[in-house]
Amino acid sequence: MDALVPLLPRGVHERAAGDGTVELAFYEHPDALPPQAELEAAAAGHALRWEREEVPDDPLERRRRFGRSWEIAGRLRVRSPADPPGDGTLPELVIESAAGAFGTGAHPTTRMCLELLLDMEPGGPFADLGCGAGVLAIAAATLGWAPVIAVDHEPQSVAATQRNADRNGAAVDALELDLLAVAPPPAPTLAANVPPPVHAALAPRLAPAVIHVIASGFVEAERDDVLAAYAGFVPLARLGDGWQAVLLERTT
């Protein structure tokens, strides 16, 4: 998954298929797919069997086929609108994806960020940097942070976040912002589930008001370099074996 996701930006749907096998499904126009040899090289060391099927070019149909829900630390459930509601024992967030919008809960980094967020004491302003479809911002607003700002450089992600916030009755302001060019909002608590080059750009520009950062979007081999960019912060908690999520706290 770690190697395939960068090649398939519309997302990969993972589920156990029995007998020790895992099904990885992805949707794309044939002309836009990476070469099969490139995908096989990314999955080196794993026995692969390929199946191709024509499906309607309809996001609702794709969600009906692979709609999923995720339980976060036994305290929160995240699902798509295509999934049935839970049994009511856990609070739920309903997050609808959009073409190119990350951050629905499907990726392990998003779920790890949510788990770290659930262990924090909510309160004060919060900013979700690289919000995708907005689940981290919406969770923060639901838990008690306020005001909550969500930023992304993709207009479709900003629109998806605002729609999802409205769907969940969460007070979130979603804004278009290029974190490679503009300093992040000066909220005391930030979540940044972004690639290493974005961490390298935003970390030196953090305002003194920033106290806690949930940092993710990198793998273990990249962790030390990413954390080194956050001078004056120390890790309080870490999750993950391949993909990583780290809670940082300012010390200076």
Image (cartoon, rainbow, N blue to C red):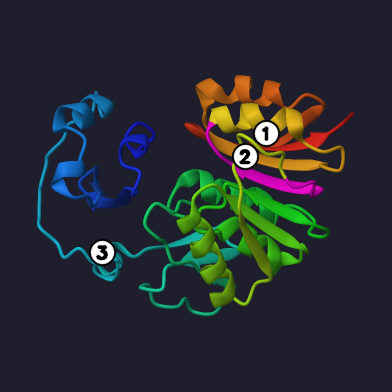
- The secondary structure type at the circle numbered 1 is helix
Q: Residue furthest front?
A: 181
How many tags in the picture? 3
Mark 3 secondary-structure assignment: helix
For the point 70% across and 65% down, the residue is 141
* Left or right side of 119 for 26: left
| Three-letter amino acid code of the residue under disc 2 | Leu
What residue is shown with label 3?
62
Q: Are marks 1 and 2 in contact (CB under 8 Å)?
A: yes
Does 93 appear above or below 118? below
The structure residue drawn at horizontal position 55% and vertical position 59%, both measured from the top left corner, is 134
Instruction: Give the foreground label among 3 and 1.
Output: 1
Circle 2 sits on which residue? Answer: 179
Q: Is mark 2 on a helix, strand or loop?
A: loop
The image's mark for residue 10 is none
Mark before the other along the chain sequence, 1 or 2: 2
User: Residue tagged by mark 1?
Assistant: 202
Q: Nearer the viewer, residue 104 or 59?
A: 59
Amino acid at pointer 1? Leu
Residue depicted at x 29% and y 65% = 59
Where residue 33 appears, as percent x and y from the top left, is 20, 40
Farthest-out residue, right: 252
Rate crowding at label 1 as few (under 14), some (14 to 19) or many (20 or more) other CA atoms within 10 Å.
some
What's drawn in magenta, residue-wise? Answer: 185-195
Q: In which quarter of the image is the N terminus?
A: top left
Query: Closer to the N terminus: mark 3 or mark 1?
Result: 3
- x, y percent for residue 107: 44, 48
Considering only vertical position in the picture, is 174 above or below 249? Answer: below
